[in-house]
Each structure stands twice: as C-alpha cells, then as structure tokens.
C-alpha cells in the first residue's frame, strides 16, 4: 500500500505540472495584452505595467518565474486589482466555495444513496419508477437552468427563499439544490443498480435464511459492496461540483472563487487565472487521490491482487 501511495503522489505532481504548463501557454497564446483595454492609458504606461508584471520578458522566463511562484505558493498581485494579491483573493473566496461544495456534496451523497436504496428495495414498484424519473430529470437538466427555475419559482413567485448572496443558511438552499441535483441523480442510479446486484448474492440469501432483519441485511451486509461504484465516481462528481460552482456562484452572487475566476477571464488577469487554476487543480487531484485510497479500503481484494502480483 505504501508503494502505491508513493506512485500516486508522483502521478499527482506530474499531473499538476502538466495542467500548469498547459494553462500557462494557452493563456499566453491569446493575442494582445491585459492592458490593451485600458483606453485612458498611454503606450508608455502600458509598457511600464508590462515590465512591472514581467510580461515583457521572453515566454520561457515568465514560465520559469511562474513555476517558482507555484512552488512557493506566492501568486503575486492581481493585474486588475493591484491593491490585492491573488493569495488574499483566494483566502477570501475559497472558504465560501469550500462551504458550498461540502454542503452540496453531502446533500448529493446522502440523498442519492437513500433514493437508490429505496428504489432497489421497491424494485419495479411505484417508488422505484418515481425515484428513477427524478434521477433522469436531475441528470438531464443543467444546473444553471435549474438555478433559474428555482429562483423564479421559490424566490420570485412564492418568495419563500432569498434570491442571492451568502449571508445566512437560507441563502445556501437554492444554490445547493441547483448544484446537488445532478450528482444526486447519478449516485441514486448507481446505488440502485449496484444494490440490486448485491441483493442477489449468496451471502445475502444466507443472511436472510438466518433471519436477520432487512435493516441489518441492507446496512451491515449489502451497502458496503453496493457503494463501491459510488466511491469510484466520487472524484469526478466532486470535480463537477467544484467547477459547477463557477456558474452558480455568478448566478447567485456568491462571493466565492468562481466570482474571481470569471472576472479574471473577462479582464485577462493572468495571475488570478493561473492562481485559481492551480488552486482548483490541486484540490481536485487531492480528492481523486483520496477516492483511490478509500476504494482500496472498501475493497480489500485490491490489496490481495497487488500482493499476488508481487
């Protein structure tokens, strides 16, 4: 297991380096300069600004300087908001985005697993069909469309929830629902199909023959194996939730990292673009790594196969 973890850590570093390199050169391949849109700025001032931000240096020099900033985790000042550093912006935005992501992931996982279990236990019944209809709708409707519908119905027409901002638990409900519905639907379908397969296994029949209660059979014997496919997709679902917050944060005026990322793209604020990209990429890579470890813990056969291979 130790060797596997070391290999995964090396792969994480290589993946992050590739993302940084690709983002850097794609960003600088776009013609123009971040200062071109400043109509009241003279060419001399623009050149001085480019010199201050090292944009007049050869691209390989800028790349080397940026790799150094990534290693030291010092992304420097924002171009468009020179009074703020990228680190300060990340420090303000990340707690909000993290809170939204954790709440959304928790709601999606628990509601999806519960819906999948209920649908499996009521297979081919009304509840099963209803649950899968909800799941199909959740997968089909994009989160930004769902967000608009939720605002229109629950905030505007019924006026039972606030429209935007992030100042109380009630403000969390609409963006959480908009983000959690899609992942919840995927988890529900996976849990249902996996649970149906597990419930036909011999050890489940043995547990039933012993007279164990349905609750013990489901939660003590069946659920652990049924959750393996769910754990497998947790990394990608977490990634979709985190990247999905960009649009949702903009719609609901949430002061998270998505706000800074969208603004930085519109204004070509290179340090903010690179800082948020590196930060998000690091989080997603770490989450994928944790999912791999969790999968090995849940399924001991992975360890056995590796021992046999060695």
Image: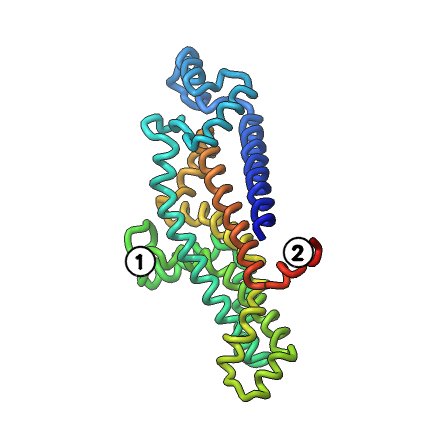
29 to 45, vertically: above or below = below
Q: Which residue is mark 2?
A: 306
Q: Position of residue 157 (x, y in %)?
A: 35, 61
Q: Is residue 27 left or right of residue 148?
A: right
Residue under the image location 42 percent in, 43 percent down: 258
* Closer to the eye: label 2 or 1: 2
| Tag 2 and tag 1, C-beta contact below 8 Å | no
Q: Position of residue 109 (x, y in %)?
A: 48, 63
**Counting other residues with Cα less than 10 Å from the Cα at mark 1, is it few (<14), some (14-19), or many (20 or more)?**
few
In depth, the one of 265 and 274 nearer the eye is 274
Colouring method of the image: rainbow
Q: Secondary structure at mark 1?
A: helix
| Residue 227 lies in quadrant | bottom right
Residue at far right of view: 309
Residue under the image location 51 percent in, 52 percent down: 290
56 to 84, vertically: above or below = above
Can residue 67 be seen here? The reply is: yes
Residue under the image location 57 percent in, 50 percent down: 2
Q: Which mark is residue 169?
A: 1
Q: Is residue 192 left or right of residue 96?
A: right
Between the residue at mark 2 and the residue at mark 1, the CA separation in whole angstroms equals 46 Å
| Residue 22 lies in quadrant | top right
Q: How many marks?
A: 2
Q: Secondary structure at mark 2?
A: helix
């Amino acid at each position: 297991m130790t060797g596997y973890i070391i290999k995964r850590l090396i792969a994480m570093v290589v993946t992050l380096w590739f993302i940084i390199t690709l983002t850097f050169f794609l960003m600088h391949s776009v013609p123009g300069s971040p200062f071109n849109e400043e109509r009241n700025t003279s060419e001399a001032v623009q050149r001085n600004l480019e010199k201050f931000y090292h944009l007049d240096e050869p691209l390989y020099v800028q790349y080397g300087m940026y790799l150094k900033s990534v290693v030291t985790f010092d992304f420097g000042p924002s171009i468009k908001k020179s009074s703020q550093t990228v680190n300060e912006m990340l420090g303000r935005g990340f707690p909000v985005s993290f809170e939204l992501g954790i709440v959304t992931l928790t709601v999606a996982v628990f509601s999806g697993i519960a819906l999948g279990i209920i649908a499996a236990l009521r297979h081919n019944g009304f509840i099963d069909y209803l649950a899968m209809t909800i799941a199909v709708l959740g997968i089909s409707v994009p989160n930004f469309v769902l967000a608009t519908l939720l605002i229109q119905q629950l905030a505007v027409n019924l006026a039972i929830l606030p429209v935007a901002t992030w100042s109380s638990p009630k403000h969390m409900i609409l963006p959480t629902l908009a983000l959690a519905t899609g992942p919840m639907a995927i988890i529900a379908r996976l849990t249902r199909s996996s649970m149906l397969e597990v419930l036909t296994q011999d050890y489940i029949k043995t547990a039933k023959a012993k007279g164990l209660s349905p609750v013990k059979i489901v939660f003590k014997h069946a659920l652990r194996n049924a959750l393996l496919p769910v754990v497998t997709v947790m990394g990608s679902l977490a990634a979709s939730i985190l990247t999905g917050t960009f649009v949702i944060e903009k719609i609901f005026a949430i002061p998270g990292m998505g706000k800074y990322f969208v603004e930085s793209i519109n204004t070509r604020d290179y340090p903010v673009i690179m800082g948020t990209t590196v930060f998000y990429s690091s989080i997603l890579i770490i989450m994928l790594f944790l999912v791999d470890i969790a999968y090995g813990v849940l399924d001991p056969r992975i360890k056995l196969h590796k021992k046999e291979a060695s």
